[in-house]
Amino acid sequence: MTGLDTQVMYVRGVGPRVAELLAAKGIATAEDLLYHLPFRYEDRQNPRSLDELRPGEMASVIAEVRGSALLRTRRAPIFELTIGQGRLAMKCLWFNGSYLQGKFLAGQTIAVFGKVEPSRSTSNFKMIQPQWELLPDASADAETLLLEVGRITPVYESLGGARLASRWQRKVIFHLLESLHASQPGAIPECLPAAMLERLALPSREMALREVHFPPEGTTMTTLQACNTPAYRRLIFEELFFLELGLELKRRKLRERAGIGFETNEKVREAIREVLPFHPTNAQKRALGEIVADMKQPTPMRRLLQGDVGSGKTIVALQAMLVAIENGYQAALMAPTEILATQHFLAARKLLERSSRKYRVVLLTGSLDEDRKRLNRALIHRGEANLVIGTHALIEEKVEFDRLGLVVVDEQHRFGVLQRFRLMKKPHQAQPDVLVMTATPIPRTLALSLYGDLDLSVLDELPPGRTPILTRRVTGERAEKVWEFVRKQVKQGRQAYIVYPVIEGTRADQPELDFSPEKTQAAQSLTKHATLKAAKEGETGDLFPKLAPETNPNIKSSLKSAVEMYEKLRTGPLQDLRIGLIHGRLDADEKEVIMRRFQRGEIDVLVSTTVIEVGVDVPNATIMVVEHAERFGLAQLHQLRGRVGRGAARSYCILMTGARVSEDAEERLNAMVRTQDGFELADLDLSMRGPGEIFGTRQAGLPDFRVANLVRDRKLLELAKQEAARFANAPAQESEGTEAERARVWARLKEAWQRKYGLVEAG
Ligand code: ADP
Ligand code: MG
């Protein structure tokens, strides 16, 4: 008897060999197969007539094969297929199309899908590289006819070559649905309470699965393509509901754990007053108030402090850390890069020197030499270090704190690390409080829904005395003008950054960039289901996705690199200035020396890669030049620009591009010129790339979704969050659904989180 958990091998039409191929695609059970959804549909109920096409639109057309030819050209052979309806004809072209020879016979019926292009030849239109499928002729078996023609037909991503393409999947899935239906009632068990479905007007799971694969007659194509049919809404809601329910539970579990109830008294307040270098903004006061209120609770704090670049998160964190320290605990600050850790270390030490109390601040990063690491580890272990600042090394080097009270994670999206903080404390001790700081202005609703287990504080105000940054786009041809401007500004006592996408001319071993071909391909083959999967974990430890998706790995040769340009500028246009070079391949000490010299004003112009993109704070630097700006993502450009405009002097951001810029890049650059509002930019970034690309689903501890898309489905995400809270928190007698239904929800939650999301919290 077939059930959802039946091994896919035993599904009719599959068998052991195909099952192996499917396994490679992550499809192990009948359920997995059912959740491999079509990525588009073809309306074969009402086929389009060739004379109603409009150039530029995507269209699917059913027509008769008339003839074909292989056109030899100097570059690649082009396969040309002529198809027609009555007197009307259209050409379809495939480059490198030799493989198509002999595949078509005149008189066959074919469905093609592609962009309609105007054509100069006899036919009015053509399609270039359309997707195609030969339709069965009248002699085919009834079932094939049923699935292929006269209906809305699902089109699937192939699960392995031509053999496991759409046609195969239609049949297998059709039979699977039939046999599940026939074998026993409830073979596709409902996992949500009936009362909830009724209230939200959503169909059953079985109906939803059936209808996403085989939409009922009369479904409109636009709702279908927008994944907005009841069937889609049901499956999306279900997926997001279990995500939010899991987050809700995580949050409740955390609340039950023992944390530290810090005290704030006059002594603590005095300690803060002694070091505070300026009046905090109202936003900073509010955020600190929220953080301290959490810290006083005996349950562990998990709070996200969100503030655009330059909003002054660091000082808020420092004050929170002083609360912990004055209570006799140690505080740790974790930064994503060595440069940033070092900068925080130097700044914290300088600030705390103003205090009459003797605080000990210690740095711990991976590339410190072994002796210093050993010494610092001992200081931490013995409790002599009050404030510890470092990188991931704090976790990786198995540093054990004597009394860890507060962990602050700066500029960090890899929320997965949250779970690993327990490594840093002694086993019997209470959970430290955790504050995560992010400059990525995640739209508020999305942040709350995604990081449902974190509370949120927002710095929505910049410190006073900032002047807006002037942003300009120029093409590389005007470089001379740019260098002249830099020279002028430096003469007036200012400093500049000049940023390049790569360290040196080759792509090998360049921590700032990751051109790995799978990644680029993955990013290019974005289909609606693949969007989230495309974001692979960055190996560099950098925070933002490295490159815009359309980046072509083959155009490296023309890229200017930091090392080359450093030499060129130093000996050419900027020879009378003091120039420094910094990139990810320098070791920690070298980076520290250079950053310090730049901070002290001993370097006028810092040539750099994106290593400086987050957190670096030198208020006297007022010029940010980004070369090859079209190659950077929006979040990255916004971060880079955030390095300037930190003082009272007028600041400039100059985005230099090549002569030709892709459409997407055009949109990004225009947005940068238009606005400085991080939230607006983040919204645009989200809609252009999707959150998986931005946060890295794995890095953020987020699941790959089977159906949902967090940007498209923002509304359903909100609904799912509300429903999850309602379900989890309702007292049994008021809750929706029978006891059995509720039990099924919990069972499903456990299974979903363990199997699919791998998000089960350890310990
Ligand atoms: P970010 O939120 O990007 O981490 P920082 O914490 O680096 O921002 O702060 C940006 C700059 O603003 C720093 O130079 C910091 O000293 C300064 N700053 C922060 N808060 C204030 C304030 N209330 N008044 C004046 N300057 C401030
Ligand atoms: Mg910062």
Image: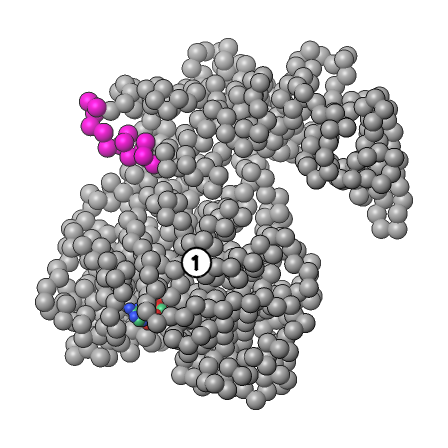
Q: Which amino acid, mark 1?
A: Asp
Ligand 1 is within 8 Å of the C-beta of the residue at disc 1: no
**Coordinates of residue 575 in the picture (x, y in percent):** 59, 87
Is 584 displayed left or right of 249 in the figure? Answer: right
Is residue 677 found inside the magenta-colored segment of the image?
A: no
**Coordinates of residue 6 in the picture (x, y in percent):** 49, 22
Which is more toward the observer, 506 or 280? 280
> Measuring 90% from the left and 44% from the top, which residue is drawn there?
72
The quarter of the image that holds ligand 1 is: bottom left
* Magenta range: 721-734
Mark 1 sits on what residue? 677
Name the secondary structure under disc 1: loop
In the rendered view, would you say 189 is above or below 633? above
Which is more toward the observer, 366 or 241? 241
Is residue 723 found inside the magenta-colored segment of the image?
A: yes
> Measuring 62% from the left and 85% from the top, which residue is drawn there?
571
Is disc 1 surrounded by few (<14), some (14 to 19) or many (20+) residues within 10 Å?
Answer: few
Q: Is residue 595 visible?
A: no
> Measuring 16% from the left and 76% from the top, which residue is drawn there?
357
Residue at the far left: name it.
266
Q: Is residue 678 visible?
A: yes
**Coordinates of residue 719 in the picture (x, y in percent):** 36, 34
> Measuring 44% from the left and 74% from the top, which residue is drawn there?
650
**Coordinates of residue 471 in the picture (x, y in percent):** 52, 67
Residue at the far bottom: name it.
576
Q: Quadrant of residue 486?
A: bottom right
Q: What secondary structure predominates along the stretch shown in magenta? A: helix
Which is more toward the observer, 372 or 329? 329
Instruction: Count every numbered label the image shows and give the total.
Output: 1
Say how the picture is coloured. one colour
In the rendered view, would you say 57 is above or below 407? above
Locate the C terminus and report the quarter of the image it occupies: top left
